Image (tube, grey):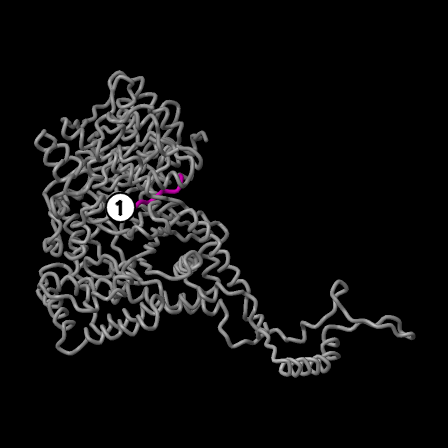
C-alpha cells in the first residue's frame, strides 16, 4: 500500500497506533574500451567514461558549441501577437459547442463592442504591441506566464507539479534493484546535464524548423525559491549566457559549476558529487557504492530518521517563505543552497508499489515526507520502479519528455543486473572503510517543528481529497487509429468529450496544452477541444448506432467523428503557431490591470469565465520510455487527464477531488474505456460498405425465420422469400392502412407517429 506504516512512524510527530566467454569479452573490450571486475562478474565499462576529458567552460570546443546554439536560437522567430479580429473570431467559434443561441448572441455583441475602431480592444492591443516593440524580453508573454506560476500562493504539490513514470527496465521487468536503477538513471540525468552545460546537446527541430532550446538550461541546477507575494527562479551555471537569457526578467542566474546531486532517504539529505574534477560523470560502480553507503547509513537501526523538512515545500508559499527565513537564521543556508544548486534530486523511497495506481500516487505526492517539491526529483521505490516529479514553473512537458527519453535509453543500455549490484553492495558492507558522503543536517527548533506538524496535517488532508486512478487500455492504440484515417490525439480527445457527455449530459471547457517552442522562449498555448463538430459527434454517438436508412444523407457517426477530429487538428495547428485564443486574451487582460483600465464586457461576460473554467485539463506526453504521466485537476470540480498513446495501447492517469460530489476518477476511467471501445465500433462499422450494398441482396429466406408457405398438391409445400412476401402483401397492407386511417378519422382517435428505421 502507499501509506507505509514504518515510514510514517519514523516521522517525529506521528503517533504509532550469461556468463561472458573470453571471445565475447575480447570483442566487447574492443567496442567498449575496458571492463570492471566485481566479485566473479565482469562488467563492461561504457566508452563515454573513456573519452577525452570534458572541455573547460572557456575551451574552443565549448565556444564553438555555444556559437552553434546561439545561431540556432537567433533563427527561432519571436512569439507573434495575433490580430484582435483573428482572436475574437476563433473565440466565438470556440463557444459554439458550449453555450446556447441566446448566450452566444450576447457574447457576439460584446465582441463587436470590443472590436470597435478606436475602442478598448485597440487600446489594449496597442499597449501589448508596445511591449513587443521594445524587445526588452525574449518574448512579450514570458513575464506574464512566469507570473502566473510564481505569483500563485497555493501548495504546488499535486496542484502544479506533474510527474512521469518510467517503464520497468527491460532486463528487470518484474523487480529491480533500487540502488542499481537509481544509479543508472541519475547517471543518465548527469550526462544530460553535462551536454546542456557544454552546449553539446543536439539541437531540436520540427519539420526542419528550429525549436527554442531555452528551457533545457532550467531543467538542471535550477530551483523555485519561495518569497512573499511572488516566488523566484534561480539557475546556477558557469557557462556563458546567450543573448536572450540575459534579457530574462524572471530568472536569476548565479555563477556556479555544480557537480553534485542531493539524495533523500528517510528524510535525510546527502550531497553526492556525481561529476568528477575532470568534468566526467562518475563510473556506475562508484555511484552504486556511494548510494549503498547512504542507504547503509540511513537504515542503521541506531540512526534516527531526519526531520521531514521537505514538508515545508507543500505549504502555502508565503508560509514556506517565512519558514525558510527561519531556517536560514538557524544556519541552514548552505544546505538550502546545496539543494538549489544540485543537478537533480534523487529520492530513495522505502515503499514498493503493488499497482500502477499506487505508483502514480507515489510519484504525484507520496506522503509529503522525503520530498522537496521545489526541485525536479528522480524518485525510485524499493522495488526499482522509477519516475520523475517536475516543478512546473521552469519548463514544460515537451522538454522534460526528451530528457526522460534519454535517461531511459541510457538506463536500458547500461544498467547493471541485480546480481552485479548486490555484489557491489556486499563489498561496501564488508569494507570497514566506506566512501565518505556529505550529509546536510538541518537544525529544527520548536517553532519549525510545530510548522512541520501543521504542514503534514494539511498535506495529508490534500492527499485524501485527491482521487488518482489510471486506465491501461490495451485493446488498441495509435496504429489502429491511424489506419482509421483519424489523428490519434484527436481520437482520444473526442473520447474524453464522449465520456464527459455521457456522465453529465453536456460539454464543458476542455484544455489541451500545445507547445509553442517554435518561437523564442515559447511555452504553451491552449487547444480548446470543445468545438461544434465535437458536440455534433458526441450527440450522435449517444443515439442508437444502427437506425439509419441505407443511402441516408444524414452524416454517419464515423463521418461526424472524422469531421470533429479534423476540427481538432486544425485548432492544434493554430495553437502551435501561436494563433490560439487564451494566451492573447490573457495578455490583453493583463494590460487592463497594469494600466488601471476597467475590463470590457467581453471579459466580465459569464461565458468568458465558463469557457476558461477547465473542467477537463488534458495533456499528451507519449513516449516508449514512460508508462505514466499525470497531474492534478486545475479546478475543484474538474479532472486532470494525463495520457499517452502508444502503437498498441493507450494509458491515462485521471485525477479529481473527492470533495466535489460530481467528480469521480474511478467512474471516469471506467466510462473512458467504454467510450474508446464504442468509438472503435463506430470506426469498424464501415459505413462505406453499407452505402454500396444493394437493398435486394438483403432478401433471402432462412429455415429458422418466420416465413409464409402453402401446400400445392402437385409440388408439395411452397415457401415464399422475404421479397415475395413483401410483394404479395404490399397492396393489401396499403389498403388496410388506408382503411385504418379512415376509421381513425371517423372516430376522432389519434396515434403516436411511427418512425421508420
The stretch in magenta equals 158-168
Q: Position of residue 9 (x, y in %)?
A: 30, 25
Task: Give the residue number, with chain letter if any, for mark 1.
Answer: 161
Q: Is residue 125 visible?
A: yes
| Image location (x, y in percent) of residue 553 | 51, 77
Which quadrant of the figure contains the N terminus?
top left
Can residue 46 be seen here?
A: no
Tell me: 55 left or right of 94: left
> Among all residues in the image, which is located at the extreme right?
714
Q: Is residue 708 left or right of residue 168?
A: right
The one of 173 and 525 positioned closer to us in this rendering: 525
Q: Quadrant of residue 601?
A: bottom left
The front one of 604 and 742 is: 742
Residue visible at 25% across and 52% down in the picture:
396
Q: Magenta stretch containing residue 543, yes or no?
A: no
| Mark 1, other Cα within 10 Å: few <14 / some 14–19 / many ≥20 | many
> In the rendered image, which quarter is residue 708 located in?
bottom right
Compared with 574, 421 (above or below) is above
User: Helix or strand or loop: what does disc 1 sit on?
Assistant: loop
> 390 or 254, which is in the foreground?
390
Which part of the image, by quadrant, shows the C terminus? bottom right
Q: Position of residue 605 (x, y in %)?
A: 23, 66
Farthest residue, direction front: 747
Tell whether 259 sits left or right of 660.
left
When the figure is inspected, residue 492 is found, relative to residue 336, above or below; the finding is: below
Residue 122 sits in quarter: bottom left
- Numbered disc total: 1
Amino acid at each position: 500500500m502507499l501509506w507505509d506504516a514504518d515510514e510514517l512512524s519514523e516521522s517525529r510527530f506521528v503517533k504509532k497506533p550469461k556468463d561472458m566467454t573470453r571471445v565475447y569479452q575480447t570483442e566487447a573490450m574492443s567496442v567498449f574500451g575496458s571492463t570492471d571486475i566485481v566479485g566473479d562478474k565482469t562488467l563492461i565499462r561504457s566508452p563515454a567514461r573513456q573519452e577525452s576529458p570534458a572541455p573547460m567552460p572557456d575551451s574552443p570546443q565549448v565556444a564553438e558549441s555555444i556559437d552553434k546554439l546561439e545561431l540556432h536560437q537567433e533563427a527561432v522567430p519571436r512569439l507573434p501577437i495575433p490580430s484582435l479580429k483573428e482572436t475574437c473570431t476563433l473565440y466565438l467559434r470556440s463557444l459554439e459547442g458550449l453555450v446556447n443561441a441566446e448566450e452566444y448572441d450576447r457574447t457576439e455583441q460584446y465582441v463587436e463592442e470590443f472590436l470597435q475602431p478606436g475602442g478598448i480592444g485597440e487600446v489594449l492591443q496597442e499597449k501589448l504591441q508596445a511591449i513587443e516593440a521594445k524587445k526588452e524580453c525574449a518574448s512579450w508573454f514570458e513575464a506574464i506566464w512566469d507570473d502566473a506560476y510564481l505569483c500563485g500562493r497555493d501548495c504546488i504539490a499535486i496542484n502544479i507539479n506533474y510527474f512521469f513514470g518510467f517503464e520497468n527496465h527491460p532486463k528487470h521487468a518484474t523487480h529491480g534493484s533500487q540502488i542499481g536503477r537509481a544509479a543508472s538513471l541519475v547517471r543518465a540525468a548527469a550526462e544530460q546535464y553535462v551536454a546542456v552545460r557544454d552546449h553539446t546537446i543536439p539541437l531540436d527541430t520540427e519539420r526542419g524548423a528550429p525549436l527554442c532550446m531555452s528551457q533545457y538550461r532550467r531543467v538542471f541546477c535550477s530551483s523555485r525559491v519561495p518569497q512573499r507575494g511572488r516566488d523566484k527562479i534561480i539557475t546556477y551555471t558557469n557557462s556563458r549566457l546567450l543573448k536572450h537569457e540575459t534579457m530574462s526578467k524572471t530568472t536569476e542566474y548565479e555563477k556556479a559549476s555544480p557537480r553534485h546531486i542531493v539524495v533523500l532517504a528517510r528524510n535525510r539529505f546527502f550531497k553526492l558529487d556525481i561529476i568528477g574534477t575532470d568534468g566526467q560523470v562518475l563510473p556506475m560502480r562508484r555511484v552504486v557504492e556511494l548510494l549503498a553507503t547512504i542507504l547503509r547509513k540511513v537504515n542503521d537501526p541506531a540512526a534516527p530518521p531526519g526531520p521531514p523538512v521537505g514538508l515545508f515545500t507543500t505549504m502555502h508559499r508565503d508560509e514556506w517563505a517565512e519558514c525558510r527565513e527561519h531556517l536560514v537564521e538557524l544556519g541552514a543556508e548552505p544546505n538550502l543552497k546545496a539543494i538549489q544548486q544540485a543537478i537533480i534530486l534523487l529520492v530513495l523511497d522505502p515503499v514498493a508499489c503493488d499497482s500502477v495506481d499506487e505508483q502514480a500516487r507515489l510519484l504525484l505526492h507520496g506522503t509529503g515526507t522525503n520530498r522537496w517539491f521545489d526541485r525536479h526529483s528522480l524518485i525510485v521505490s524499493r522495488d526499482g520502479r522509477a519516475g520523475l516529479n517536475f516543478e512546473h514553473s521552469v519548463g514544460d512537458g515537451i522538454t522534460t519528455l526528451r530528457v526522460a527519453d534519454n535517461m531511459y535509453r541510457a538506463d536500458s543500455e547500461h544498467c547493471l543486473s541485480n546480481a552485479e549490484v548486490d555484489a557491489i553492495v556486499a563489498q561496501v558492507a564488508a569494507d570497514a572503510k566506506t566512501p565518505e558522503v556529505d550529509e546536510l543536517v538541518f537544525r529544527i527548533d520548536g517553532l519549525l517543528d510545530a510548522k512541520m506538524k501543521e504542514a503534514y496535517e494539511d498535506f495529508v488532508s490534500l492527499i485524501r481529497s485527491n482521487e488518482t486512478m489510471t486506465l491501461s487500455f490495451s485493446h488498441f492504440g495509435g496504429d489502429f487509429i491511424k489506419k482509421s484515417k483519424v489523428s490519434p490525439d484527436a481520437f482520444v480527445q473526442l473520447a474524453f468529450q464522449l465520456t464527459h457527455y455521457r456522465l453529465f449530459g453536456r460539454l464543458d471547457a476542455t484544455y489541451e496544452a500545445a507547445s509553442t517552442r517554435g518561437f523564442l522562449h515559447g511555452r504553451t498555448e491552449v487547444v480548446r477541444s470543445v468545438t461544434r463538430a465535437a458536440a455534433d459527434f458526441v450527440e450522435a454517438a449517444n443515439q442508437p448506432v444502427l437506425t439509419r436508412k441505407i443511402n441516408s444523407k444524414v452524416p454517419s457517426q464515423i463521418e461526424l467523428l472524422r469531421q470533429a477530429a479534423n476540427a481538432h487538428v486544425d485548432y492544434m495547428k493554430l495553437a502551435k503557431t501561436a494563433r490560439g485564443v487564451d494566451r492573447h486574451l490573457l495578455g490583453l487582460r493583463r494590460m487592463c490591470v497594469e494600466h488601471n483600465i476597467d475590463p470590457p464586457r467581453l471579459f466580465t461576460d459569464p461565458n468568458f469565465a465558463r469557457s476558461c473554467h477547465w473542467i477537463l485539463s488534458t495533456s499528451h506526453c507519449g513516449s516508449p520510455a514512460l508508462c505514466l504521466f499525470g497531474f492534478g485537476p486545475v479546478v475543484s470540480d474538474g479532472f486532470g487527464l494525463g495520457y499517452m498513446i502508444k502503437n498498441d495501447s493507450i494509458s491515462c492517469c485521471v485525477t479529481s477531488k473527492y470533495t466535489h460530489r460530481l467528480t469521480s476518477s474511478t467512474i471516469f476511467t471506467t466510462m473512458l474505456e467504454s467510450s474508446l471501445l464504442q468509438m472503435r465500433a463506430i470506426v469498424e462499422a464501415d459505413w462505406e460498405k453499407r452505402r454500396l450494398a444493394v437493398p435486394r441482396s438483403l432478401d433471402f429466406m432462412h429455415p429458422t425465420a418466420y416465413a409464409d408457405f402453402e401446400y400445392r398438391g402437385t409440388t408439395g409445400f411452397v415457401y415464399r422469400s422475404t421479397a415475395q412476401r413483401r410483394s404479395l402483401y404490399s397492396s393489401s397492407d396499403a389498403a388496410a392502412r388506408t382503411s385504418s386511417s379512415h376509421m381513425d378519422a371517423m372516430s376522432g382517435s389519434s396515434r403516436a407517429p411511427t418512425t421508420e428505421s
